[in-house]
């Protein structure tokens, strides 16, 4: 029997686009980084982008304990039957080490995007029919309907680009049982202007996407907060930055709001598909 998901992932993980790569020449670099992250004490590695079991397998094989999850696998670009087979193969070889994180992506990125909630329900039904266990999958849920689906049809939720207020809202909807593992951007920078500039450069990719902006508006932000790369209020709510104490306090705010686990995306100004190993070590030193 595999370890329950909450226990398996622990309190902290690393969220990274860089750990997901199609380039076989990078395999050694990625597996070395994964092994170091496990040694640093992170309980989970979350593979950004449209990731799959194929991306997770080398990292699982190179480590002994850490859980590897997709964050996310797009329901539009992966057939559920194939996803269930890939999960079964990896889980059979390494029980309890892989989690299938699913999401609906965005209309601006997916040509066939239509009725996303209905499509997600259908995808989960197909995974059930193919034998994929519900307690080994997670949903990138933001709104109330998808959060209830994460509660009822999955092991929990892995929401992206959210605040402690959203975390409290999600916990109220899902109850205490399911895993709630929000992603959180961490910027190890004390200068306010530079920290916020790094945050706004990161947000350029996301502020045009209604799934995120609609969620911000539901949780107390205004259209003014979405302009000019995001207001200071929005940036400071979405990212942990500052000195060690300020970053620690921001992490604690998410746990106080009901998070079980934080998927930390460390932003140091390097390309998003890089491996900020020095910054990962610095952040690991802050964690309890």
Image (spheres, grey):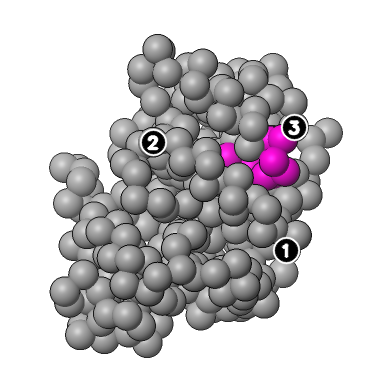
As helix, strand or loop, the secondary structure at mark 3 comes to loop
- Give how far across and how far down residue 71 sits, in percent: 46, 44
Residue 177: mark: 1
Q: Which residue is mark 2?
A: 274
- In the shown orientation, is residue 2 left or right of residue 126? right
Rounded to the nearest angstrom, the CA distance separating label 3 from label 1 is: 23 Å
Q: Work out which quarter of the rendered image holds the C terminus and state it.
A: bottom right
Identity of the residue furthest to the right in this view: 1
Q: Which residue is mark 3?
A: 65
The label nearer to you, 3 versus 2, is: 2
Q: Kindly tell me whether residue 95 is visible in this rendering.
A: yes
| Marks 2 & 1, CB-CB < 8 Å contact | no
Q: Work out which quarter of the rendered image holds the N terminus and state it.
A: top right
- In the shown orientation, is residue 8 left or right of residue 21? right
Q: Residue at x 35, y 37 (%)?
A: 273
Q: Kindly tell me whether residue 209 is visible in this rendering.
A: no
Tell me if residue 215 is in the magenta stretch: no
- Please provide the residue range marked out in magenta: 38-46
Rounded to the nearest angstrom, the CA distance separating label 2 from label 1 is: 35 Å
Q: Earlier in the sequence, mark 2 or mark 1?
A: 1
Rounded to the nearest angstrom, the CA distance separating label 3 from label 2 is: 23 Å
Identity of the residue furthest to the top in this view: 25
The label nearer to you, 3 versus 1, is: 3
The count of marks equals 3
Badge 2 density bin: few <14, some 14–19, many ≥20, Cα 10 Å: few
Occupied quadrant, residue 204 = bottom left
Badge 1 density bin: few <14, some 14–19, many ≥20, Cα 10 Å: few
Between 65 and 279, the one lying in front of the other is 279
As helix, strand or loop, the secondary structure at mark 2 comes to loop
């Amino acid at each position: 029997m595999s370890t329950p998901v909450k226990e398996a992932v622990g309190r902290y993980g690393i969220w990274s686009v860089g750990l997901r790569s199609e380039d076989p020449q990078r395999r050694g670099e990625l597996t070395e980084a994964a092994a170091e992250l496990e040694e640093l004490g992170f309980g989970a590695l979350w593979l950004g982008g449209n990731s799959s079991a194929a991306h997770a397998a080398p990292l699982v094989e190179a480590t002994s304990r850490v859980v590897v999850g997709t964050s996310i696998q797009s329901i539009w670009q992966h057939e559920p039957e194939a996803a269930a087979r890939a999960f079964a193969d990896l889980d059979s070889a390494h029980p309890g080490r892989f989690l299938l994180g699913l999401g609906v992506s965005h209309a601006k990125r997916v040509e066939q995007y239509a009725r996303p909630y209905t499509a997600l329900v259908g995808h989960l039904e197909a995974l059930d029919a193919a034998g994929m266990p519900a307690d080994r999958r997670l949903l990138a849920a933001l709104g109330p309907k998808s959060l209830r689906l994460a509660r009822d049809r999955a092991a929990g939720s892995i929401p992206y680009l959210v605040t402690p207020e959203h975390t409290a809202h999600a916990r109220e909807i899902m109850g205490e049982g399911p895993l709630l593992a929000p992603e959180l951007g961490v910027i190890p920078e004390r200068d306010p202007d530079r920290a916020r500039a790094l945050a706004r450069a990161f947000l350029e990719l996301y502020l045009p996407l209604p799934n995120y902006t609609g969620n911000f508006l539901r949780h107390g932000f205004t259209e003014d907060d979405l302009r000019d790369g995001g207001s200071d209020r929005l940036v400071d709510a979405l990212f942990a930055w500052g000195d060690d104490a300020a970053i620690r306090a921001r992490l604690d705010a998410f746990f106080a709001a009901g998070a079980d686990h934080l998927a930390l995306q460390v932003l140091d100004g390097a390309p998003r598909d890089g491996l900020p190993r020095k910054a990962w070590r610095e952040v690991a030193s802050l964690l309890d």
